[in-house]
Amino acid sequence: MPLIVHQFPCLQDNYGFLARDEATGQTACIDTPDAQAILRELDKLGWSLTLILNTHWHPDHAGGNAEIKAATGAVVVGPGEVEKLSPVDREVHGGDRVQLGETTFEVIETGGHTLGHIAYHDAADSIAFVGDTLFALGCGRLFEGTPQQMWTSLQRLAALPEATTVYCAHEYTAANARFALSVDQDPALRARADQVFAARERGEPTVPTTIALEKATNPFLRAPLLAAAMGVGGAADYEAFAAVRKAKDEFKG
């Protein structure tokens, strides 16, 4: 039976995710951006929480752990860096597996935004929860890692099957699209950007996305193709990525 994902907005621009294994009814929340919002959604749905799956340590991803664990008894699973905020019951690393009822998540190492960042991939249902590593038309800032580390992490995600549904943690897509159009003139990007702007005007989410869509239009995954225009022709792929990331950090549009 499938994994059911319930997505809802919280904080200023975060998304909360509740993932329910239909075979057993076991439920996980992916990160804890807003404890009260998550507890309200659980109550509304009548779901009991089994696991908290953290992607990284930032407060808008793990700040609700203690309150939610106290309210539900859920087991906290995540990278060791989450201990900066609150205890972790099970520390996981790339290659580990986490079981939610009959659903198996593979842990993917995706450091760069933070050093210990991870993602959770449910291959059977073609779903990935990627935190702040990959965004629709974007990627996370490099607060702790290097461009080479982040490029490697993005390539791990890009290697997933193209039909994989990608749940990223923030509604940044319109801003990402404006930047993308400043560095990439590809017609597929323009068409997608128009769709994104229209969706946001209607108040609709642009998350989730897919691996195929990001490979086709995300300037951070397309960085080697943009290298010459970025003034780094002949550079290593991660150096081309670094140039795109630097341009985004400085973008004022």
Image: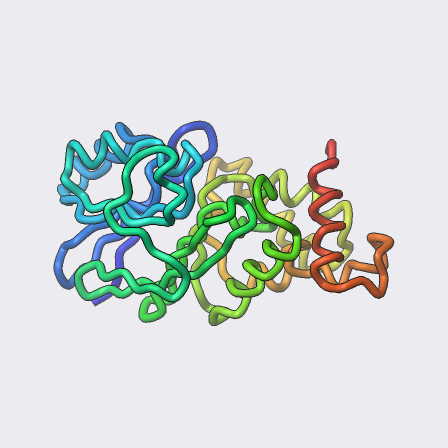
Which quarter of the figure has residue 141? top right
Total marks placed: 0
Q: Residue at x 70, y 59 (%)?
A: 238
Relative to 124, does residue 210 appear above or below in the rendering? Answer: above
Residue 56 x %, y %: 42, 44
The answer to which of 161 and 200 lies nearer the viewer is 161
Residue 138 x %, y %: 60, 48
The answer to which of 102 and 237 lies nearer the viewer is 237
* Residue 7 can be seen in this image: no
Which quarter of the figure has residue 175? top right
Display colour scheme: rainbow
Residue 173 x %, y %: 57, 43
Q: Residue at x 69, y 47 (%)?
A: 245
Residue 20 x %, y %: 22, 53
Relative to 185, does residue 248 appear above or below in the rendering? Answer: above
Using residue 253 as the reference point, say whether residue 115 is left or right of it. left
Using residue 149 as the reference point, say whether residue 163 is left or right of it. left
Quadrant of the snapshot with the C terminus: top right
* Residue 165 can be seen in this image: yes
Relative to 156, does residue 39 appear above or below in the rendering? Answer: above
Q: Residue at x 16, y 35 (%)?
A: 43
The answer to which of 249 and 235 lies nearer the viewer is 235
Relative to 30, does residue 160 appear above or below in the rendering? Answer: below
Using residue 148 as the reference point, say whether residue 86 is left or right of it. left
Using residue 21 as the reference point, say whether residue 233 is left or right of it. right
Q: Residue at x 38, y 61 (%)?
A: 107
Quadrant of the snapshot with the N terminus: bottom left
